[in-house]
Amino acid sequence: MKFIIRYWRNPSGKAPVEVYIDDIDNKEERAEILSTLNGIQLYGTDAVGVVFRQIDGKLWELKLRIYGNQHRIFYVVLRGNEMVLLHAYLKKTPKAPEREIEVAKLRMKQLKEDRK
């Protein structure tokens, strides 16, 4: 299934995942992440270079290993194939830090409330 990717935006209109990607210094690494996201839109879960992992209920994680860095992007799928990117971070520990998961869960909750 192909996905339509959207970015969660805070009340001021900023998209934290976009900011995370834009803040990556290495432009090749940044381009690779954007290319991977494009691949997800075109090929869905068959996209190359990404692992999809369920975190809790509707909260999922994209696992991207690019230029030796492990980028993680939390997302939720709404209304069929709409993938909303909630939160991203650079993984440095074996297990996802609980505070990173909590940020994503809070944003997912806000998104669901906004859509009612």
Image: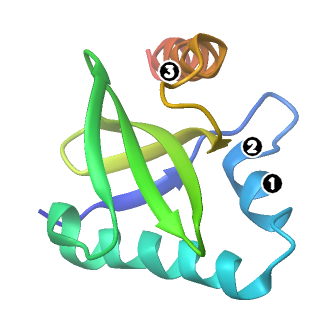
Query: What count of labels does the image hold?
Result: 3
Which residue corresponds to mark 1? 19
Q: Are marks 3 and 2 in contact (CB under 8 Å)?
A: no
Which color scheme is applied?
rainbow
Q: Are marks 3 and 1 in contact (CB under 8 Å)?
A: no
Which residue corresponds to mark 2? 16
User: To which quarter of the image does residue 28 belong?
Assistant: bottom right
Q: Earlier in the sequence, mark 3 or mark 2?
A: 2
Frontmost residue, 43 versus 113: 43
On the rendered structure, is 43 left or right of 76? left
On the rendered structure, is 2 left or right of 114? left
User: To which quarter of the image does residue 5 belong?
Assistant: bottom left
- Local secondary structure at mark 3: helix
- Which of labels 3 and 1 is toward the front? 1
Label 1 crowd bin: few (<14), some (14–19), many (20+), radius 10 Å: few
Marks 3/1: CA distance? 18 Å
Identified by mark 3, the residue type is: Met
Q: x, y percentage for residue 70?
A: 55, 54
Which residue corresponds to mark 3? 108
Q: Earlier in the sequence, mark 3 or mark 1?
A: 1
Marks 3/2: CA distance? 13 Å
Q: Are marks 2 and 1 in contact (CB under 8 Å)?
A: yes
Marks 2/1: CA distance? 5 Å
Q: x, y percentage for residue 61?
A: 39, 39
On the rendered structure, is 40 left or right of 87? left
Q: x, y percentage for residue 99?
A: 66, 13
Up/down of 63 relative to 48, above or below:
above
Up/down of 33 relative to 81, above or below:
below
